[in-house]
């Protein structure tokens, strides 16, 4: 049977979960892409296309493909690593909730402000918890 101290040591040694996020640095293309994605979903739901004509979904998909091709050079990937619980608690204590935001009132801290602080958090030992993923950095 494993001792408690061994379990704690194994837990601390285990790699922390990460989340990779791709963002566009071109706001106009990003907003246009979001609008086309919503339009594509609506077109797929309505599904009122005629047999001989191109489907409305395929027409929207063609416009979306053009945007996606143009957006490729504006994309960067960010990687966020889950913070230790005590550090997250310290961050949330610095972020009072917005009384008009239901999510903030539920959690009792500003989720937006806490996430901004967490994204740029660097531990005392130099561990970085949010960074840009470079081409050679995908193996992590």
Image (tube, grey):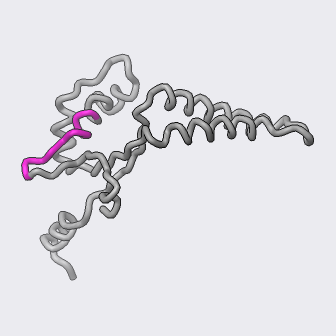
Nearer-the-camera pick, 17 or 140: 140
- At horizontal 24% and vertical 66% (from top left) the residue drawn is 14
The relative height of residue 74 versus residue 123 in the rendered view (above or below) is above
Nearer-the-camera pick, 91 or 61: 61
Residue 24 lies, in percent from the top left, at: 43, 36
Please give the count of numbered marks on the rendered protein.
0
- At horizontal 21% and vertical 42% (from top left) the residue drawn is 88
The magenta stretch is: 116-125
The relative height of residue 2 versus residue 32 in the rendered view (above or below) is below
Residue lying at the far left of the rendered structure:
124
Nearer-the-camera pick, 87 or 3: 87
Q: Is residue 135 left or right of residue 55?
A: left
29 magenta-colored: no
Which quarter of the figure is the N terminus placed in? Answer: bottom left
Residue 73 lies, in percent from the top left, at: 44, 41
**Most common SS among magenta residues:** loop
Residue 133 lies, in percent from the top left, at: 32, 50
Residue 69 lies, in percent from the top left, at: 55, 42
């Amino acid at each position: 049977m494993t001792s408690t101290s061994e379990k704690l040591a194994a837990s601390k040694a285990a790699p922390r979960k990460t989340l990779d996020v791709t963002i566009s640095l071109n706001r106009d293309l990003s907003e246009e892409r979001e609008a086309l994605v919503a339009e594509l979903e609506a077109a797929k739901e309505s599904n009122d296309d005629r047999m001989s004509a191109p489907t409305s979904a395929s027409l929207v998909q063609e416009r979306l493909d053009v945007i996606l091709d143009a957006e490729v050079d504006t994309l960067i990937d960010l990687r966020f690593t889950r913070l230790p619980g005590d550090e997250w608690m310290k961050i949330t204590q610095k972020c009072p909730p917005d009384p008009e935001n239901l999510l903030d009132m539920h959690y009792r801290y500003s989720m937006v402000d806490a996430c901004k602080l967490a994204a740029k958090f660097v531990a005392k030992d130099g561990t970085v918890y949010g960074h840009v993923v470079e081409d050679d950095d995908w193996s992590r």
